[in-house]
Image: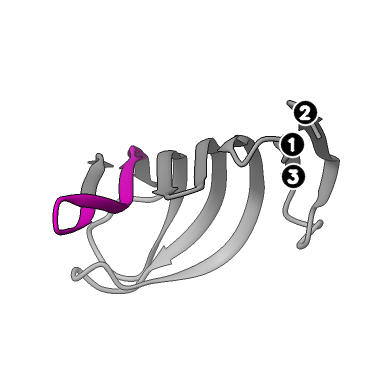
Amino acid sequence: MNHNIVSKELTYLLNGKHYGVDLFTLSLAYKYPIVFNVTAYVTPLAPPTSYPYPAAYIQYATVNLGMNAHEHYSLPGMDYKTDVLESLNSYGFMNLTLEIINPYGGAVVTGISGNYARTSKDLAAVHTYSYPTGIPGYLEKFGALAISPNATDLIGYYQYVMLRLMRIGSG
């Protein structure tokens, strides 16, 4: 069994005018790439000629989510722009033993011999003002890595979490 799902995109532009004079401009563009892969295997551990019978189940999965956003707002006397790039990547697997109880896919989990997940998230955003002058922009960076190493650590842990806000431009 294998599954893939892919991406969405949205672009929006709005200009406000009154008697030919620009009142505001709004420009938004978003991309949401998504890739989801799952591979699973079921292997009978005894002849599957009668029910119930034992089986091994192995599943591998990856999820990659993203967001690429560009926003621009302009009013008389103010101009603001933000660009965001965000990604989440997750990898995991699990190994189970099953008791297959009927021909329709019904099964009972009888054991968990392996379970692992690794998820990272990264974000970089730049927020700037073109005017009024004197307002600083800032750079935002975030990163985290979470791990669930095995079947006995049900919650898992963060290997690291990092957040930085840095002023850019004049101010």
Query: x and y percent of residue 110 in the render?
Result: 57, 66
- The kind of residue on which mark 2 rests is Ser
Q: Residue at x 27, y 55 (%)?
A: 48
Between 22 and 46, the one nearer to me in the picture = 22
- Quarter holding the C terminus? top right
Identify the magenta region: 15-37
| Label annotation for residue 147 | none
Task: Using the rendered view, name the quadrant where residue 70 is placed.
Answer: top left
Residue 16 within the segment the image draws in magenta: yes
| Image depth: mark 3 or mark 1 in front | 1
Q: Residue at x 36, y 43 (%)?
A: 40
- The kind of residue on which mark 1 rests is Gly
Between 43 and 84, the one nearer to me in the picture = 84
Q: Secondary structure at mark 3?
A: strand
Coloring scheme used: one colour
- The kind of residue on which mark 3 rests is Ala
Q: Which residue is mark 2?
A: 170
At label 3, counting other C-alpha atoms closer than 10 Å, the crowd grade (few under 14, some 14-19, many 20 or more) is: some
Prevailing secondary structure class for the magenta stretch in the rendered image: strand
Query: x and y percent of residue 26 in the render?
Result: 32, 50
Note whether 105 is above or below 138 in the view shown: below
Mark before the other along the chain sequence, 3 or 2: 3
Q: Secondary structure at mark 2?
A: loop
Between 30 and 105, the one nearer to me in the picture = 30
Query: x and y percent of residue 88 in the render?
Result: 55, 40
Mark before the other along the chain sequence, 1 or 2: 1
Q: Which residue is mark 3?
A: 146
